Image: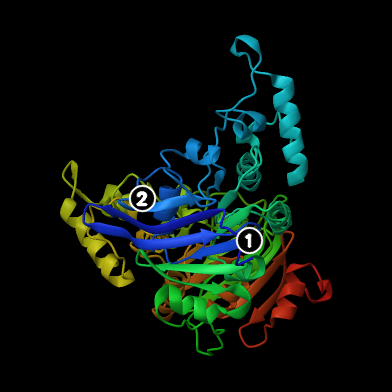
Amino acid sequence: MSDQVPVLRLEGIVKTFPGVRALDGVSFDVRPGEVHALMGENGAGKSTLMKVLGGIHAPNEGQIFIAEEPVTMTSPMQAKAKGVVFIHQELSLADELTVAENIFLGELPLKSFGRVDWATLYARTDDILKKLNVRFTAKTRVGDLSIANQQMVEIGRALTVSPRAVIFDEPTASLTDAEKVVLFDVIADLQSQGVGIVYISHRMEEVFKMTDRISVLRDGQYRGTLETAETNEDEVTKLMIGRSLDLSRNETEHEFGEVALEVRGLSCGQQFQDVDFAVHKGEVLGFYGLVGAGRTAIAETVFGLRTPSAGTILINGKEERINSPIDALRLGISLVPEDRKDQGLVLGMNCRDNMTLPQVGDLTAGPFVSDGAEIAIFDQYRDKLDIRTPGWRQLVGNLSGGNQQKIVIGKWLSMRPDVLIVDEPTRGIDVGSKSEIHNLIRELAAQGYAVIVISSEMPEVLHVSDRIVAMYSGKVMREFTAQDVTEDNLIQAISGLGDDKAA
């Protein structure tokens, strides 16, 4: 494969913005039929490099080659015409249009007088949907699909042309395990056709399963390319962040405080049934299970976003009714949601305003919001959480994923909760920032917070949790301590095995 002419090559790419050298002489190539991972921390330059390739940014220096022919990319449509197709992590679909209209948007088949050839459109879409092995149809309204199925529509766009290279940006972030299998089959099919694949992901297990080579960026500079079969996670991590990480399991034994939150027999329709658990002050309680197991629904019920159909919730030993998030906040419960960009932040607002948003009504000086009070809160939690930003005026949308997550955590910590629920704390975050978030969770527990962590990543839940609740199909199957849990018995529990040991 090494003797083959690359389908795509970038040579000496430099991109500067006012005061920032985002890319500093980066070179990268992908060969026919290869899956080539592009890795780096948030802010390392991966997105900027891909935007240069896609014609969104013009490079200050350097050259792009397609099959060794120099090209100039001026727009994503031109990139697609040259055979370079992007599958973005951030969906760019039109909710009110059908699946077929979204897949062929901008290139609808036409008949005479500019009329859409609907029969051809639906037939071509049906062929693509068969390859994706999905259950929705060409005429389904995209807004009616789940996020995971919308991601499959995004992938379908790549199959409307005969691509030379396809760039996948965190493609599995919203997919179930079954949908991941379909995605990997699609990638394998593209490989067999000689298509080069650029695979951008923070998920090490996927990178080592899927890829042939791994290239790493750090601080806008190219740090090296490794053969996947000849390297390991620690070597890749060192290239990415300049140091090794402690990814050992949490096996620390220590005393906890009183029970801060307890639920008994809690149910919510078909989402989950008869759930019991308790979390103590100073403890991290992990929830682990497959997508749809009911973990997020439990968190939303405790936070007042869902109405329970049965059961009781006790705060500091006292039974309470939680009918809304306002009730939850009053009782000392905060929730860091699963989707920080859609549910946790207003990306067009600055850091200070995002952090103080839930309590802005209490930060008034007469009829106006007190700037001084807001800035004091921001400064306190910027220092406490080590949020890296030039200042409070910075737009949250311009921060890295790890710093965005810290803003969300700071927002809810500033409400001074007793119980902090964190749903998928490191989704879409690089390994360096992931380690910082893990350390922060442990530090919060050491400060006396009762912390609930919901995660789909087994290494994460093993690393941060003192106890782990394993869920399957809306039920608690087992509860483990950090000392008695193993990967095997945890997988068995979340797969519905061992019902005789159900909690």
Using the rendered image of the protein, determine whether residue 503 is visible from the camera's viewpoint. Answer: no
Q: Name the spot of residue 348 as percent of width and height, x first.
A: 33, 44
The N terminus sits in image quarter: bottom right
**Outermost top residue:** 113
**SS for tag 1?**
loop
Q: Residue at x 70, y 49 (%)?
A: 269
Q: Residue at x 55, y 78 (%)?
A: 233
Q: Which residue is drawn at 53% across and 48% down?
A: 88
Q: Name the spot of residue 60 as percent of width and height, x first.
A: 30, 51
- Depth check, mark 2 against mark 1: the one in front is 1
Cα distance, mark 2 to mark 1? 33 Å
Q: Name the spot of residue 99 as percent of width and height, x first.
A: 65, 33
Residue kind at label 2, given as amino acid type: Gly
Asked if residue 21 is positioned above or below residue 103 in the image, the reply reads: below
Label 1 crowd bin: few (<14), some (14–19), many (20+), radius 10 Å: many
Q: Nearer the viewer, residue 468 or 486?
A: 486
Q: Name the side, left or right, on which 281 lies relative to 187.
A: left
Q: Which of marks 2 and 1 is nearer the N terminus?
A: 1
**SS for tag 2?**
helix
Q: Nearer the viewer, residue 157 or 57?
A: 57
Q: Nearer the viewer, residue 327 or 165?
A: 165
Q: Nearer the viewer, residue 414 or 339?
A: 339
The C terminus sits in image quarter: bottom right
Quickly name the residue at label 2: 397
Q: Residue at x 63, y 61 (%)?
A: 34
Quickly name the residue at label 1: 34
Label 2 crowd bin: few (<14), some (14–19), many (20+), radius 10 Å: some
